[in-house]
Image (spheres, grey):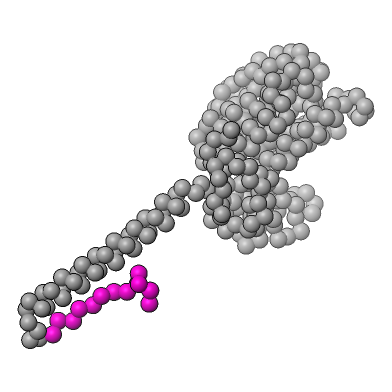
Amino acid sequence: MSQRERRVTLVFRPGLPGVLAGALLLIAATTQMRVDARQRAEQDQRGRIRSEVNLVGTLASVLDKDGRPALDLAQDQFEVYEEGVKQKIEIFEPETQQPLDLTLMIDSSLSEIKDLEFESEAASRFIQKLVRPGDRLALYEFADAVTQLAPFSSNVPTLQAALRHIVPGDGTALYDAVYLGAQALAGNPSGRRRVIVLVTDAGETTSRADFDTARRAALRADALLYTIVVRVVKNESGRNTAGEHALETIADSTGGATYFPDTIGELSEMFDRIDRELRTQYRLGYYPNPRPPDGAYRALEVRVKCECKVRSRKAYYSGGHLD
């Protein structure tokens, strides 16, 4: 029996002198109070340590060998690793119903002008299908600058009407769109899934932010990036392949995805795939052990014990401020 578990028991025997019995009672009571106080202090310390370590959450999209969402997986089929160290999963929520905050970013540069009407129609259907009670979406357009067309709202007709205010412009502030979309999400309360959906031809000409700034902002916001790249030019020599690669890299690091429709007519299908994935994600959470220093970049990996492909964010920044 450990010292913490020890209990002091006093047996009062008839005929024992009253003074001696009282003294023994006092000693026993004092000893018990010290043991109880020490236990409470240890419990409080454990509680403080626990509360100081931030819960790390991540979303996992799991696809079967045919590319369809893999449903009905159990917690013991998942493993989470931080910096190569296996973590204990504390939260497991299949097909999470955690509400969504989403920024929809529409490329309105002149290179996209001939497809803008069709993009707006597809985006309108996406908004109608995606936004459910409790979810919120904000709408932006970007050309030489990023412009908010509608703040975060659950009002579907208002959001759809804002699409009619898209105005073509010069240039393409691609990295600014990712950066500002992430910043908008980061300013919202925690406890909600954060998603950026970007529709673009992947050109980049006028951003003040660079690739790394945009990627860091998305990771700091815990935002998934889904990109639909509309290839205006099919020939690789005439495409923005550098921009395409950059978006794929950012999307992969956040746990999102990049889609390349072969025709503008497939845009609605791409939106449907994003909507389906967001409704079939697994939510995982753990308390990092060992505890990371504040502001540290931490490698993250989710593994699944099945014949599946899993997508989740590859890294996060621990609590505190980044230099």
Q: Measuring from the top left, give residue 48's x and y in whole percent.
A: 41, 51
| Quadrant that contains the C terminus | top right
Q: Residue at x 54, y 42 (%)?
A: 294
Q: Residue at x 76, y 26 (%)?
A: 200
Q: Residue at x 51, y 46 (%)?
A: 54
Q: Measuring from the top left, give residue 51's x and y in whole percent.
A: 45, 49
Q: Measuring from the top left, give residue 129's x and y in whole percent.
A: 64, 35
- The magenta stretch is 1-13
140 up-or-down from 167: above or below = below
Observer-nearest of 219 and 119: 219
Observer-nearest of 46 and 270: 46
Observer-nearest of 282 and 252: 252
Residue 136, located in which quarter of the rendered image? Answer: top right
Q: Residue at x 24, y 69 (%)?
A: 31
Q: Measuring from the top left, give residue 19's x and y in whole percent.
A: 7, 76
Q: Is residue 87 visible?
A: yes
121 up-or-down from 293: above or below = above
Observer-nearest of 242 and 102: 242
